Amino acid sequence: MMRHLISAADLTRDDAVLILDTAEEMARVADRPIKKLPALRGRTVCNLFFEDSTRTRISFEAAEKRLSADVINFAAKGSSVSKGESLKDTAQTLEAMGVDAVVIRHSASGAPYRLANSGWIDAPVINAGDGTHQHPTQALLDAFTMRRRLIGPDAGIGQGLDGRRVTIVGDILHSRVARSNVDLLHTLGAEVTLVAPPTLLPVGVDSWPCEVSYDLDATLPKTDAVMMLRVQRERMNAAFFPTEREYTRRYGLDAERLAKAPGHAIVMHPGPMVRGMEITAEVADSERCTVVEQVANGVHTRMAVLYLLLGGNEPAVSHSRTEENK
Amino acid sequence: MSKILIRGAKVLGGEPQDVLIDGEVIEAVGTGLSAEGAEVVEADGKILLPGLVDLHTHLREPGREDSETVLTGTRAAASGGYTSVFAMANTFPVADTAGVVEQVYRLGQEHGYCDVQPIGAVTVGLEGSKLAELGAMHESAAGVTVFSDDGKCVHDAVIMRRALEYVKAFGGVVAQHAQEPRLTEGAEMNEGTVSAELGLGGWPAVAEESIIARDVLLAEHVGSRVHICHLSTAGSVEIIRWAKSRGIDVTAEVTPHHLLLTDEMVRTYNPVYKVNPPLRTEKDVMALREALADGTIDIVATDHAPHPQEDKDCEWAAAAMGMVGLETALSVVQQTMVETGLLDWAGVADRMSVKPARIGQATGHGRPVSAGEPANLLLLDADYRGAVDPAGFASRSRNTPYQGRELPGRVTHTWLRGKATLADGKLA
């Protein structure tokens, strides 16, 4: 049984479906008057955040507390990169304090992998986002949201996303969300199309299990879910695209453009949204936009991951790539 | 005892012969030579080669003695069969004055494990903007002939042109670290399918190739000589091949690790594989091997880059770039070039001793194994097989990508001007 969750690519279809099914169970807990399970009572989980992310940290913290875990929040402001050794030292300090699992967020791609595989610590490691590499729990919550909206909470149990068409739009190059989603959605049987200007697609993207397009308007009619990614305004200054307005004209989602998609198609965004640039307020606030649901589902999904990795009797996920490479 | 008889050695991989050393020179090469008055070394069919010459070594002294010193680095060199190393200029302070190069040169002479020939910086502080005192370094006791800002590219085309022109006055050569700086901002590994998957900043092949293309054209225009450090891409090979066919005076080197390892290794996120230029693809590796075999790439140079453990035992992004190489270079070349049939031992001697000595003007090294020549030699047990154990390295640093990997061949003896610096696998 896998001990860490480092990459969405490490999950088999059975693992992923089990996590989504377990998340449905966890979602029911949220409807109870007392939203708490005793599953991780007496276990200590550390949220080790080398990079600011209030949203993800609070989501993990809520998930941990609903499972009755003791929570330590460690916000290493700034990056360990400039100090070199501090990730190893910090990890060993936590290990010495008896931490049972580490949720890590880091600006350096591969930092969670190193933490899990360098012999620095024994505790399970959950990747809460590393550099431009992976953010597997984000992909799981996105898949969970899609399954609920496109199939239904009960009808979806035991199901993947076979044949569903997902379009991911925006800064693919710098997006760990896009990488994680391509891996997981492919595993679950969905057809993914990435849409971005060529400057915001990585060299080598043609080897990914997805389609690539530069044309959002041509892609939308064949879409069940369109996922808008945040585009940082700074990218404009680095010449990834000429102007904000030109980006919005070609890749922004407004009501008129969304009308090209089928009526059932949902709009997703990992947040935080830059209204007016990649998405208009009209679309963001519409019934079709799932941003708020995604936040709620993030807690359910992370509860499922923590439960299966730390407390569950069922095998959560099989051997990961990280294990095989040992 | 000043006489040494090496009995039954395959000189350059040929039929077993005896080699008699008297003092600092080879007295005779032949069969059935008399052992009278000589210490006898039974070669038992081991390979005898001229002592290796590394045109690209980082000795770290002055400034980073925690990773390597001239003493530990030259002991590592002797262990690997080297009798001459060229020490790169990116020390602290930078080797951009006569004073620093003379210090490094003298330390090499004092320790006596290997001749140390300092490389001078092209620009002051490797900053790329103002030429260092190239003439003064050449005229110093160190007699610098090779100049490089290695670690950084001389990216300003005008500065590069001036450097190429200026060193003509004393027959120097500029060794370029070809890396277009803007195209490699934030670069952490080869740009391609693996970097796309791992989310690591890409170092595109074109950043190397565009500088090489520019520099061979500059060398042609000003009628000068340029040397390209650590070629790593198939495209670079094509440019060098074209330049040579055009008669441009360019030489090029490849590192052992670029002949063996690919960017697939980076999937482990183990910083031991982090190196500049980065590990490339299988296609690049094969192109580099062929180019070394056909002479397009002139030499093998180690880019021996020692780093202390704390600079590698960390996350990928935080890690220093580079790997040690002096003690494993010949083994890697044996595996990738000899055992694949691409080069014979004479070819290895040519690429690792004769040509690098010629490019760097290391007179006395890279000479034929014949009577009257300096006794700079190594003996290699090519049949040896064993896993690399960095704990046994003479280098102060252990950042080798080959830990636990089986590599063929082991240098058992090294002689520097007739004096054994390595005997029976042990340093003198």
Image: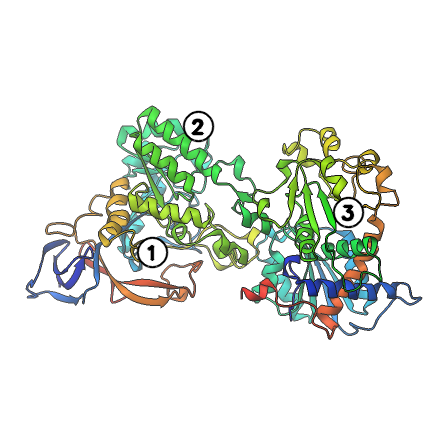
Q: Which residue is drawn at the image coordinates 44% and 28% (left, top)?
A: B157
Please state the chain letter of the residue tagged with numbered disc 2 in the rendered image.
B
The residue that label 1 is drawn on is: B71
Mark 1 and mark 2, same subunit? yes
Please state the chain letter of the residue tagged with numbered disc 3 in the rendered image.
A
Q: Helix or strand or loop: what does disc 1 sit on?
A: helix
Q: Position of residue B403 (x, y in %)?
A: 43, 63
The residue that label 2 is drawn on is: B157
Q: Nearer the viewer, mark 1 or mark 2?
A: 2
Furthest residue to the right?
A33
> How many other residues sit within 10 Å of disc 2, few (<14), some (14-19) or many (≥20)?
few
Q: Which residue is drawn at the image coordinates 62% and 53% (left, top)?
A: A80
Query: Contact, CB < 8 Å: mark 2 with mark 3?
Result: no
Q: Position of residue A194 (x, y in %)?
A: 67, 43
- Residue A252 showing in the rendered view: yes
Q: Position of residue B60 (x, y in %)?
A: 41, 50
Identify residue type, mark 2: Ala
Q: Nearer the viewer, mark 2 or mark 3?
A: 3
- Could you say which disc has been placed on residue A275 in the image? none
Marks 1 and 2 sit apart, C-alpha to C-alpha, by: 37 Å
Q: Which residue is drawn at the image coordinates 30% and 63% (left, top)?
A: B410
A152 lies left or right of B302: right
Q: Helix or strand or loop: what does disc 2 sit on?
A: helix
> How many other residues sit within 10 Å of disc 1, few (<14), some (14-19) or many (≥20)?
many
Q: Earlier in the sequence, mark 1 or mark 2?
A: 1
Residue A280, picture quadrant:
top right
> In this rendering, is residue B428 above or below B307?
below
B52 lies left or right of A173: left
The residue that label 3 is drawn on is: A225
